[in-house]
């Protein structure tokens, strides 16, 4: 048993009380790492945020609509991806923003700031690629570690949150152990990693039968037989099914918010659960399945 979630104090405490490892959400760690990386640029980004707000007013939006179909974007403090999107949109809108507009002139970034922001956008493109890949539903902890290690190769400054043994990781032995097993390096597990993965260990039936047969042998034969039994590889099951992020849960809550609107607030919990179950598992049924059931 394990818990997957943000590396917050509540989740760490919950995992501790349950006596299970906590797999920290990779998307959450990446978000924290990027927010720390962006702190030196905060003044420039806040200026762009102010400009984007100004461009969303009725007067400025109407002027902008005559020149382009692009609309200003604002950033969300809890999601660094919105900062990347806002910065990209600002640079795309620059040519349509009039420098003679007194209302905008006071909030326009300086030429030096524009150079910094343009370089920042290029620099963060690789991080955005990693962030989007982490949204995939078919990733495991080995894929996650490969992605983060690849990012650390070009941006070592993000290691404070993204390193496998960083302070924010609640169960480093468990996560590193899973990565080693999935990478075919089960024999290189440390004692602590083996202990953390003990609940996922399944000895093969063949090895079990051999141990039972060895018990019937003499002491000397058992010693020789034990060497053969220990040479059999141990099988760890279900490790590939451990998700590296909690994004799928966040999507479920987003779907629930879309389903349970004001016009549907009288839905019973049972009906709501049934609708959400069907939506989440839509890949496993179609019209033919419904026709057979009805």
Image (cartoon, grey):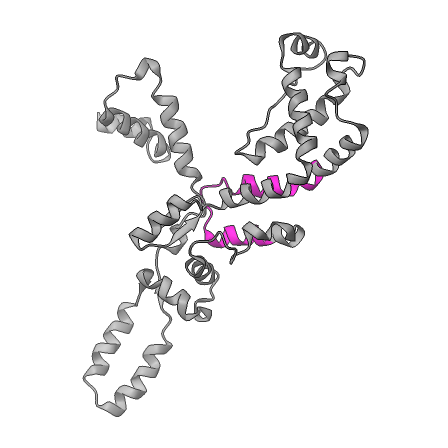
Residue at the image position 29 percent from the left and 73 percent from the top: 207
Q: Does 68 sit above or below residue 34?
A: above
Residue drawn at 36 percent across, 62 percent down: 197
Residue closest to the far bottom: 220
- Provide the residue span drawn in magenta: 121-149
In-front residue for pair 231/189: 189
Taking 56 as reference, is 143 above or below it?
A: below
36 to the left or right of 259? right
- Say which residue appears at 30% left-offset and 84% top-offset: 225
**Which image quadrant for residue 195?**
bottom left
Question: Which quadrant would the C terminus be assigned to in this image?
Answer: top left
In this rendering, position of residue 105 left or right of residue 292: right
Using the rendered image of the protein, determine whether residue 226 is visible from the camera's viewpoint: yes
Give the overall secondary structure of the magenta segment. helix
Residue 145 within the segment the image draws in magenta: yes
Q: Residue at x 45, y 58 (%)?
A: 172
Residue 53, image x and y in percent?
63, 19
Relative image position of residue 285 (x, y in whole percent)? 32, 32
| Image location of residue 70, percent across then percent down | 66, 18
Q: Is residue 85 left or right of residue 222?
A: right
Identify the residue at the far left of this view: 216
Q: Is residue 1 visible?
A: no
**Is-magenta flag for residue 61?**
no
Residue 54 occupies quadrant? top right
Q: Quadrant of residue 112?
A: top right
In the displayed structure, 275 sits above or below 250; it is above
Residues 274 and 34: in front is: 34
Q: Position of residue 34 (x, y in %)?
A: 60, 42
């Amino acid at each position: 048993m394990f818990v997957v979630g943000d590396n917050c104090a509540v989740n760490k405490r919950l995992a501790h009380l349950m006596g299970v490892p906590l797999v920290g959400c990779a998307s959450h760690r990446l978000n924290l790492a990027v927010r720390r990386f962006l702190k030196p640029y905060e003044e420039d980004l806040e200026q762009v945020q102010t400009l984007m707000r100004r461009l969303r007013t009725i007067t400025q939006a109407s002027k902008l609509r005559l020149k382009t179909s692009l609309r200003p974007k604002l950033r969300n403090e809890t999601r660094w991806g919105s900062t990347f999107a806002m910065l990209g949109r600002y640079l795309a809108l620059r040519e349509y923003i009039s420098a003679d507009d007194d209302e905008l002139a006071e909030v326009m970034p300086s030429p030096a700031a524009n150079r910094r922001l343009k370089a920042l956008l290029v620099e963060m493109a690789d991080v955005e690629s990693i962030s989007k890949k982490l949204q995939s539903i078919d990733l495991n902890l080995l894929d996650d570690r490969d992605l983060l290690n690849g990012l650390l190769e070009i941006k070592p400054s993000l290691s404070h949150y993204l390193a496998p043994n960083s302070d924010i990781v609640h169960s480093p032995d468990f996560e590193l152990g899973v990565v080693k097993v999935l990478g075919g390096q089960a024999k290189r597990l440390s004692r602590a990693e083996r202990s953390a993965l003990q609940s996922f260990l399944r000895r093969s039936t063949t090895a079990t039968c051999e141990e039972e047969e060895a018990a019937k042998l003499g002491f000397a034969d058992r010693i020789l037989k034990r060497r053969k039994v220990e040479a059999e590889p141990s099988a760890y099951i279900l490790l590939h099914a451990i998700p590296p992020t909690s994004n799928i849960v966040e999507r479920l809550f987003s779907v629930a918010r879309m389903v349970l609107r004001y016009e549907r607030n009288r839905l019973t919990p049972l009906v709501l659960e049934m609708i959400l179950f069907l939506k989440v598992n839509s890949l496993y049924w179609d019209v033919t399945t419904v026709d057979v059931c009805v």
